[in-house]
Image: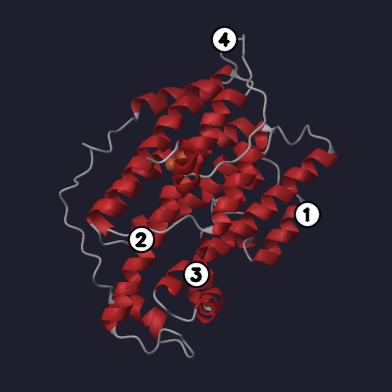
Amino acid sequence: MRSTSQFVADRCSSVEMSFPAVFSWDYDHQDDRLVRLYDKAKRSQWNAATDLDWSIDVDQSHLDAGLLAVLRDPPGSPFAHLTDGELAEIGWESQAWTVSQFLHGEQGALLATAKLVDAVPDEDAKLYAATQVMDEARHVEVYERYLSQKLDRSYPINPHLDSLLRDLLSDSRWDVTYLGMQIMVESLALAAFGFIYQTTNEPLLRDITAHVMADEARHVAFGIASLTGVYDQMDERERRDREEFVCEAAELMRDRFLQREVWERAGLPADECEAFVRDNPLQVQFRSLLFSKVVPNVKRIGLLTPYVRDRFERLGILEFESEPASA
Ligand SMILES: [Fe+2]
Ligand SMILES: [Fe+2]
């Protein structure tokens, strides 16, 4: 029989966390926005097992002609020699990779919001964060079930996403957990979910996405409500730390969408495929669109400073500054 430590080594990984768990003895409501969000969250709970039609038969074995052309037609494409069937197989892998990263990201959100319940000093935020813990558990449930029952394949966490989740969980400052999860990761997830909702023709994934997006919009609103004004009062050195964190998070998130693990599993030249995905104009446009909610939300909490603006400009994501934020 395997020991507990063996099980942990095989199936788990850990992040050292050190932060004060804070009691709040002030039960008076301080923030109407959080009270309203808490009330809305309680009314908006759904059941992943019964509110979705799991009887839908998912067939990922074909790709639409437009996507095939995007991959295969550009000059110098490393996919040019592949048949429709081989490309469709890669498309299935790519979908499994994407949903796997959603699953791992949702588990990160589960851990992060459980930490927020302990660490935030304000009672309204603790109560709201508790509802988000349940939301994230439901999201883990739904993506795990979709992967195991409908796609029948999965991928480990992408190293860039892993690094970001570890950074935001191990930081002892409660606002950095908010900043990393509620603003950066969830704003980007909301854009990615929106893209999938608009483009997928798979009815179960579309319905899952609609349910998850409704929760995530609330989560981002929670982050904005909690962080508005916090950075205006911070001294310059402390604020610069947050600016650095936001820029590094944006770089990690941009690089996680190159799908190297998919090319490796398919036996394709991974460096070549990664370079193609990095430089292909449509892929560049897709990745920058993922930041269309990150940038306005960073601005709303007062962190789109000249320093961050300059770094975002070099990342090619500043164009979204004036987009309406989701909240
Ligand atoms: Fe989530
Ligand atoms: Fe979330």
Residue 98 at x, y percent in the picture:
41, 59
Q: Residues within 10 Å of mark 1 (few under 14, many from 20)?
A: few
Which residue is the site of mark 3?
260
Which of the two labelled residues, at mark 2 and mark 3, occupies the earlier sequence position? 2
Which residue is the site of mark 2?
96
> Going 42% across and 37% down the picture, which residue do you hit?
136
Residue 238 at x, y percent in the picture:
80, 39
Local secondary structure at mark 2: helix
Q: CA distance from mark 2 to mark 4?
A: 45 Å
Which of the two labelled residues, at mark 3 and mark 4, occupies the earlier sequence position? 4
Res. 133 image quadrant:
top left
Q: Nearer the viewer, mark 1 or mark 2?
A: 2
Which residue is the site of mark 1?
307
Which numbered circle lies on residue 27? 4
Which of the two labelled residues, at mark 1 and mark 4, occupies the earlier sequence position? 4
Res. 122 image quadrant:
top right
Local secondary structure at mark 1: helix
Q: CA distance from mark 1 to mark 4?
A: 39 Å
Which of the two labelled residues, at mark 1 and mark 3, occupies the earlier sequence position? 3
Amino acid type at circle 1 is Tyr
**Left or right relative to 184: residue 18:** right
Which residue occupies the foreground of this view, 201 or 140?
Answer: 140
